Image: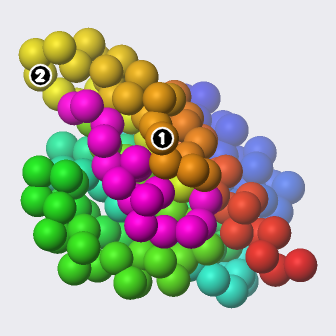
Amino acid sequence: MQVAGIAAKLLDHGQNVLATRVTPEHARAVKKKFKHAIYHEMARCITIEKKPLPKRPGTIAVACAGTSDLPVAEEAAITADIMGNNVERFCDVGVAGVHRLLNRIETIRSANVVIVVAGMEGALPSVVAGLVSKPVIAVPTSVGYGASFGGLAALLGMLNSCGSGVTVVNIDNGFGAGYAAAQINALTDK
């Protein structure tokens, strides 16, 4: 299988491996070849750390609105983690129960960058941006019903955010958010 072959090449060059959007079949093939591979089922990712990177100072917060947003939030968290970042997860802190967000806001504020994952109308990144003074990376998910249009409603809501410091990645792009957050957090090292 191609995924196992690509992983082998990366490991041969001394690199860690992150494979996203993997199927259970991909995971079985990779784990058969590399016993220390970790399949992150919810995130649909495989990681193989030949040499774990030292963790940078600072934290990346990953907040998701609801449990149905968890696969995308986990993809973002795992991406940021394997890139050498401390990641703290905040699950089920959406606007439908905003008190849950407010109960965790001080910890979220202490992060260097915040990834916010939400479907439906995509309001959570605007709320978070109004409460923190750090970069916010908004990730719309394809979760929703009615007029969510597979995440388009959340995407448009996030693109139209009045919250300062909100940057938006594409629908379900947890990898892109995790990668960007890792780059931002690396700037705080300098």
Q: Residue at x 71, y 81 (%)?
A: 56
Q: Could you say where residue 140 lies in the image, as x and y percent from the top left?
A: 39, 35
Task: Indicate left or right for 127 with 66 as reference.
Answer: right
Q: Could you say where residue 15 lies in the image, as x and y percent from the top left?
A: 77, 59
Tell me if residue 152 is in the magenta stretch. Answer: no
Task: Indicate left or right for 150 with 85 as reference.
Answer: left
Q: Residue at x 85, y 55 (%)?
A: 13
Residue 3: in sight, yes or no? yes
Residue type highlighted by circle 2: Tyr
Task: Indicate left or right for 94 with 22 as reference.
Answer: left
Residue type highlighted by circle 1: Cys
Tell me the quadrant of the picture where the N terminus can be found: top right
Is disc 2 placed on a helix, strand or loop?
loop
Classify mark 2: residues with Cα within 10 Å, few (<14), some (14-19) or many (20+): few
Q: Which residue is nearer to you in this view: 140 or 37? A: 140
**Vertical relation: 25 (above or below) 94:** above
Q: Nearer the viewer, mark 2 or mark 1?
A: 1
Q: Are marks 2 and 1 in contact (CB under 8 Å)?
A: no
Q: Which residues are magenta?
A: 120-135
**How far, Cα to Cα, is label 2 from label 1?**
24 Å
Tell me the quadrant of the picture where the C terminus can be found: bottom right
Is disc 1 placed on a helix, strand or loop?
loop
Classify mark 1: residues with Cα within 10 Å, few (<14), some (14-19) or many (20+): some
Q: Could you say where residue 113 lies in the image, as x and y percent from the top left?
A: 58, 66
In the picture, the disc for residue 162 is: 1
What residue sits right under mark 2 in the picture? 145
Residue 26: in sight, yes or no? no
In the picture, the disc for residue 27 is: none
Mark 1 or mark 2, which is nearer the start of the sequence? Answer: 2
Q: Residue at x 32, y 49 (%)?
A: 124
**Vertical relation: 102 (above or below) 107:** above
